[in-house]
């Protein structure tokens, strides 16, 4: 089978590794990754330069920005490869707690991030790993190896005939700064194309067209962020924590992005703005001035120190994607943000991409085994791919939808509010942390739902259900 993965970020790279691990007879399959944005060698952007929002957003897709891999995401990495899991953990910061604060200086609550309370005895506990996106990406890239990622821009998909059978044609164009074939368009056929190309997915557009309901929607929130080389504040080191601060005019977070001794502090600020920045003319000096003004009265001295020294290294409008009627068909499938871009408030963007990659690879491996496929049986291969596609959506959609809905409840806490609403927000967050029973009544047992979900178990249940349905209808595979 020939597989092309579009997008060389966290989801795309992890999908490649899962496919190589789980597909039967792995050496018989050709798997390639197309990525349109070679990573920058530095996180630093010139403070006074005028830049393009698309350039900033795309160039930081692989390098810039910080994130947290939740325990469920770290467990996927452990299942994939223990050495890879340990490498990701070692280069990041193990955030054992989340500390929630108000802009007035109040501490609203502390939550443990570990999944030990919902795991069986003897299982190693996972905690949230705070990291630069580049740090995680680099671990995955090293595991993938050289010669797999091809830096060409995917511009569209098409149906092509190849030896009497229909395949998916992937149209790519050489990069402008690549002297070898710059701008030259090529078409390459594949049995399966996996769209891991993010919220502005070309693969999704090829599937659904340009209807507005299939496009991402701006939430009204934008964010800026970056990294500072400095000693890590004691509020982080003492509690081994990530700090989340809510205020009437936005949100501010900070954490170590690596082992404390490396002195790498990551920060991010989210704020409400009804319009997107001028995509043709972004002045980072102006954005820095707005950052200082926005947080000038916040009481946390660490926030003040960070804002004073910060350089704007990432700019990211928050986009979400409405529920799609499917995530793929006829040899095309979407994963990660291309299928279900969610609000960063969920804290699950990267982890859900990792779960997608594991689930898809395990499903495809199982459906191929069930069809007893050889390379000379294209119809059986197509049937296996179609079934994996169908079950992938059936299994993953409810999981993602629940997380998205839970995120909506918290995303409003980052919007601009008045003084009364601000203090009500503080009281609400304090109450959820102080009385866990109330949090469970409102949100459910979040940790158990998040951290005990198993791709293998869900696949087994879905296949057993499919077998029962086939048996009752007399519809067996030949």
Image (cartoon, rainbow, N blue to C red):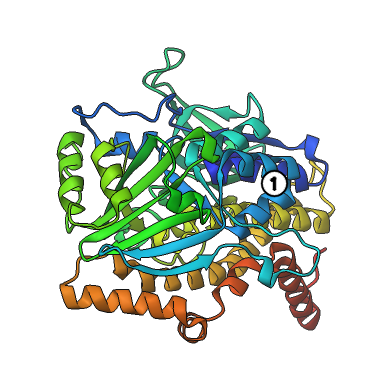
Q: Mark yes or no: residue 160 visible.
A: no
Answer few, some or many: residues within 10 Å of disc 1's Cα (few below 14, many 20 plus, some between 14 and 19). many
Residue most toward the top? Answer: 179
Query: In the picture provided, is 160 more to the left or to the right than 191?
Result: left
Name the residue beneath numbered marker 1. 18
Q: Residue at x 62, y 42 (%)?
A: 88
Q: Residue at x 25, y 58 (%)?
A: 299
Query: In the picture provided, is 289 more to the left or to the right than 386?
Result: left
Identify which residue, 334 or 386, lies in the foreground. 334
Q: Mark yes or no: residue 311 visible.
A: yes
Establish if 150 lies above or below 351: above
Identify which residue, 412 or 9, lies in the foreground. 412
Count of picture labels: 1
Q: Secondary structure at mark 1?
A: helix
In the rendered image, residue 230, in percent from the top left (x then y), is placed at 40, 35
Identify which residue, 20 or 327, lies in the foreground. 20
The quadrant of the picture occupied by the C terminus is bottom right
């Amino acid at each position: 089978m020939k597989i092309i993965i579009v997008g060389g970020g966290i989801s795309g790279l992890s999908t490649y590794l899962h496919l190589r691990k789980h597909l039967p007879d792995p050496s018989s399959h050709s798997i390639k990754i197309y990525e349109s944005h070679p990573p920058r060698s530095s996180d630093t952007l010139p403070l006074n330069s005028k830049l393009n929002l698309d350039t900033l957003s795309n160039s930081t897709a692989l390098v810039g920005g910080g994130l947290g891999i939740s325990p469920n995401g770290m467990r996927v990495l452990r299942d994939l490869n223990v050495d890879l899991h340990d490498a990701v953990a070692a280069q990041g910061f193990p955030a054992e707690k989340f500390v929630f604060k108000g802009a007035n200086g109040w501490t609203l609550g502390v939550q443990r991030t570990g999944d030990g309370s919902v795991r069986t005895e003897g299982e190693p506990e996972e905690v949230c790993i705070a990291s630069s996106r580049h740090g995680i990406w680099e671990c995955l890239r090293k595991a993938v190896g050289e010669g797999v990622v091809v830096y060409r821009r995917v511009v569209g998909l098409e149906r092509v005939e190849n030896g009497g059978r229909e395949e998916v044609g992937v149209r790519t164009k050489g990069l402008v700064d690549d002297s070898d074939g710059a701008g030259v368009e090529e078409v390459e056929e594949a049995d399966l194309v996996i769209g891991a190309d993010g919220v502005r997915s070309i693969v999704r557009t090829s599937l659904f067209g340009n209807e507005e309901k299939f496009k991402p929607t701006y939430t009204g929130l934008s964010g800026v962020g970056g990294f500072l080389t400095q000693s890590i504040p004691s509020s982080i080191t003492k509690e081994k924590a990530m700090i989340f601060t809510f205020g009437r005019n936005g949100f501010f977070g900070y954490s170590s992005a690596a082992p404390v001794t490396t002195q790498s502090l990551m920060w991010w600020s989210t704020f409400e703005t009804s319009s997107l920045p001028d995509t043709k003319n972004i002045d980072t000096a102006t954005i820095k001035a707005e950052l200082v003004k926005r947080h000038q009265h916040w009481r946390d001295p660490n926030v003040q120190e960070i804002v004073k020294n910060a350089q704007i290294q990432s700019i990211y409008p928050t986009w979400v994607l409405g529920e799609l009627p499917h995530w793929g068909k006829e040899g095309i499938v979407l994963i990660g943000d291309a299928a279900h871009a969610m609000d960063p408030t969920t804290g699950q963007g990267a982890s859900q991409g990792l779960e997608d990659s594991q689930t898809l690879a395990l499903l495809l491996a199982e459906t191929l085994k069930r069809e007893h496929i050889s390379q000379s049986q294209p119809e059986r291969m197509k049937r296996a791919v179609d079934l994996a596609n169908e079950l992938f959506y059936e299994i993953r959609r409810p999981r993602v939808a629940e997380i998205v809905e839970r995120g909506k409840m918290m995303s409003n806490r980052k919007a601009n509010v008045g003084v009364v609403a601000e203090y009500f927000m503080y009281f609400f967050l304090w109450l959820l942390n102080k009385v866990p029973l109330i949090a469970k009544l409102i949100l459910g047992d979040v940790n158990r739902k998040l951290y005990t979900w198993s791709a293998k178990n869900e696949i087994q249940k879905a296949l057993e259900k499919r077998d029962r349905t086939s048996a009752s209808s007399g519809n067996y595979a030949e």
